[in-house]
Image (cartoon, coloured by chain):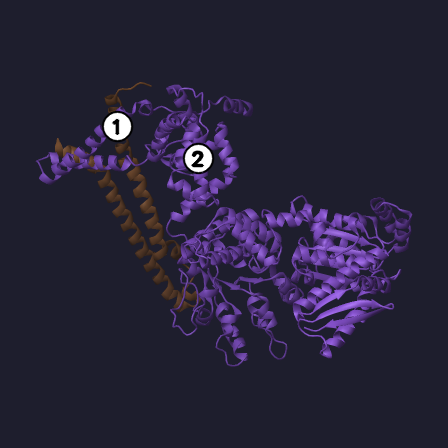
Amino acid sequence: MEQTLLGYFFQKLGFYILDFVKTYFIGGHRLLLKTYQNLFTKLEHKVGLIINIRYFLIPLWQEYSLPAYLLSIPYRIIKIIFGGIVLILLTLAFGAVYVCWLCLPFYLIFKTI
Amino acid sequence: MKKEKMKQKENKPERSLYFRDAFFFWPRWRRFLYRVIFSAFLYLGLIFSFFLIILQIERWSNLAIILFLFFVYVFIKQNQAEFSYPENNLTKPNLNLAHFLFPKARDILLESRDVAINYKISLESALLLILLFQEDIEETLSFLDISSSQIEEMREYLRKEKLEQMEKITDQNYELFLENVCRQAFIESVNLKRDSINIDSLMLSLYFSEDPRVAAVFDLFHLEKSDLVTAFEMNRLSREKGIEVLKGLADKRQITFQPKRIKVNRSLTSRPTPTLDLYGIDFTELALELKIGIMIGHQQEYQSLVDILTREGKSNVLLVGPDGVGKETIVSYLALNLVHDKVPPAIRDYRLINLSLSSLLEDIEEPLEVFNRLTKITKELLFNRDIILYLPQFHNYKSLAQKGGYNALDAFQSLINTAWVPIIGATTPEDYRRYLEEDSIIRENFEIIKVKELTSEEAIAFLAFRSLELQRKTKVKVSFKAIKRAVALAQRFLTTVPLPSSAESLLTEAIEGARRNKKKIVTEQDIVDLVSLKTQIPLDISSDEEREKLLNLEELIHKRLINQEEAVQLVASALRQYRAGLSNVNKPIAVFLFVGPTGVGKTELAKALAEIYFGSEKTMIRFDMAEYQDKKSIYRFIGSPDGSSYGALTEAARNNPFSLILLDEFEKAHPDVLNIFLALFDEGRLTDNLGQIIDFTNTIIIATSNALSDFIKDEIEKGTETQKLAEILKKKLTDYFKPELLNRFNEVVVFRPLTQEHLKEIVELKLKELANSLMKNKKIELFFDEGVVEKLAQLGYNPIFGARPLDSVIRHYIKDSLAKSILQEKTGPNSKVNFVLENGEIKTKIAAA
């Protein structure tokens, strides 16, 4: 198991370089995805997109009358559209961050060259 | 095909774990040099790249950003293991364990070689020695009642025995050591769900060491591996932020007149329920705020609850279990799962509202008002299809009645009949039996779920978690051993309250005691002392005084009981076996049948036992079995089937679980009454009229019988040995008792008839008692002539009644004349009263002070 000091140093350096690349791309991907999933779930819970789709035909307060339907369906449509927009915006924002994150090292290297 | 697959599986090469890291085998100076070079590289790199960014040297500043990020990464990474488990595929065929070492563990392993050489001890001992110096390990061991001084003893033990002919620690030995330790530590850390090999997994790996001294340390200090694992877990959790054990809502009542917003569900399908919101507590809201929802155990009951709530048709549930068993915990857990949509779609987006009768009764001026409130709430609920109603103390709704026989439960009648508002009721078995069992509405509309007590393992897990919360609040630590002991003792001695509540109350009480005494930790001994104090039973046989007492039980009993050596010896030996832990804990402490003529000391021995064992004669509960001669008297014993009256025996044991039960003239009871004792003697428990199990495992049961007294007398006169006589008697007693009942007694104890000589000794004993009592209470000294003693013994002896007339003889000849002289003021404090025999008569001579 004899190894020179410099040999050991460069072996470690190699490990750190490889691990840095791995952590940046794979670890970064995992972190962003997890954060996105958490935020998506919380926001969905708040805006109630899925629940409004599921209860689309059930009037508000369960008041099964024509005026209630007339009020309820537009209300749910608005909620669904609003919720959809919020979630799409969140997805787009995270997509943008993700692309930037992935491209940043290549961009910096490209600018250097 | 299957076979081939199996074969493939069998041939699958095993994963190879190895240890390879040259750094460990370098001399100290080279390791130091490497660290200097590496640190220089790291810090210079950080400074260099930082300045490149700041100075913005043309395009190089862009590259500097990447370099700076890289050096920051290396800076962080050097304080972590190179690889961590979750991010690496542990199923890889070859794994170098050196990559999984946490820097601290790495340093300890490096140091172990030097320590082993310096102290001339084995590498394993050296590793344990270094580990014992780690603050983290000291903290962990304190959870196992191991003090700093004991840790020092361990260190000393490891340092002390030097290996005289120690082999030189070669690189090969060291490599083998590293590989073995790290392999085991790797397995342990994966089991502990850690990211890397840390000092806790290193410590656990030593349980697999073959070093005799390491094993001896674990043995000497009773360090079980499973306990250590839990202690590590507790230590880790105690440092984590945000541990909130969510339980109990008693203090979370809402203020009645607080204006509230209208509560709705997310889908806005719920109708407003202002009255319900006013008097109820929204469990789903509390769960959302993470104030409730933790559940340990009870999975089966929870699953049944969800199944019933989501099925078609009636979905009402009645949770039946003793107070403190965890009924509300199950409901709180449901609330948490409702919030997180972790329930079947049928009840998703439901609100769970707790409506207690006490909140409904608050601020009412007229009793009728509560019914109005209930009617309003029912109306509100009938318009909703997304509310689960939780009614704690459900029986109260039934018992709260108004004139005309209309009870509060009737107000919910329409609600119960619908299928869309699930109701969860909670009650105790006694209240269920008393108020609800016969109710047809309950029978037809509610599904019963019996909530069982937690197992001891579940209770330990719960309390380990709870103790950390208490530690945070009170700054008093509870050792894991204390928790284990609290659960074991609560299960054994505090049987009226279920787990975990019984053990939890012990812990909170012990914590309070520790706070008062400025102690920082509650240990196992504190719990033992507390239970001893509560039950009056000396549980600790480790003290010299208690050991002496147990070893000399016969002498102690003979201080108040004359003759009956064999009986005393049998009883003492049975009790010693029990206290030494050699008896079956699922039976009463002891069950004896005392047989012998009347007035020979059977009851006296029972009293002596009650005093010695339970601390007072008052703990003896006496039943005259002659009163239970008819068949129906069984109900007086265990309670009437309709629940209208309690059983004398079951209530006595429930109220005094630590007592001596004396069943006088046992043979006179009706055979059906005697049959009750078959199960009681065998299992140590009895089911009462309400279906509750009454625990008798902490009682001593003594049945007495005068049967075959003449036969005993004849045999004793013939000189038959007591042991042989007991055997003969056991056969003859089958005329009175069923053989299976006789076999359930620990001992059939034969009492000998008393002789004149015994009577004299008893008289002396009784006179001594009287003299002591008078001296203590009235400061009057009593003296008795030998002749007086003999005279009293003659007068007190009756061949039929044994020593029974003795008390009345002493009363007549001694106490009576004493009373007169006290009233006539001839005798007072500091008087000396001499009782002498003159002309065959007992006379009093008083010497005034």
Q: Nearer the viewer, residue A12 or A1?
A: A1
Q: Is residue B563 above or below residue B141?
A: below
Q: Identify the secondary structure beneath mark 2.
A: helix
Q: Nearer the viewer, residue B380 or B766?
A: B766
Palette colour of chain A: brown
The answer to whether residue B603 shows anywhere in this view is: yes
Tell me the number on the disc at residue B69.
none
Question: Taking B258 as reference, is B845 left or right?
Answer: right
Question: Taking B385 as reference, is A95 left or right?
Answer: left
The answer to whether residue B321 shows anywhere in this view is: no
Q: Which residue is farthest bottom?
A: B366
Question: Taking B385 as reference, is B455 left or right?
Answer: right
| Residue receiving disc 2 | B156
Tell me the number on the disc at residue B32.
1
Residue A91, horizontal then vertical, whole percent: 29, 47
Q: Residue at x 43, y 73 (%)?
A: B256
Sooner in the amino-acid sequence: mark 2 or mark 1: 1
- Quadrant for residue B704, please give it: bottom right
Q: Identify the secondary structure beneath mark 1.
A: helix
Residue B560, horizontal then vertical, whole percent: 73, 57
Q: CA distance from mark 2 to mark 1?
A: 30 Å
Question: Taking B362 as reference, is B612 left or right?
Answer: right
Three-letter code, disc 1: Phe
User: The chain coloured purple carries which letter?
Assistant: B
Q: Nearer the viewer, residue B534 or B832?
A: B832
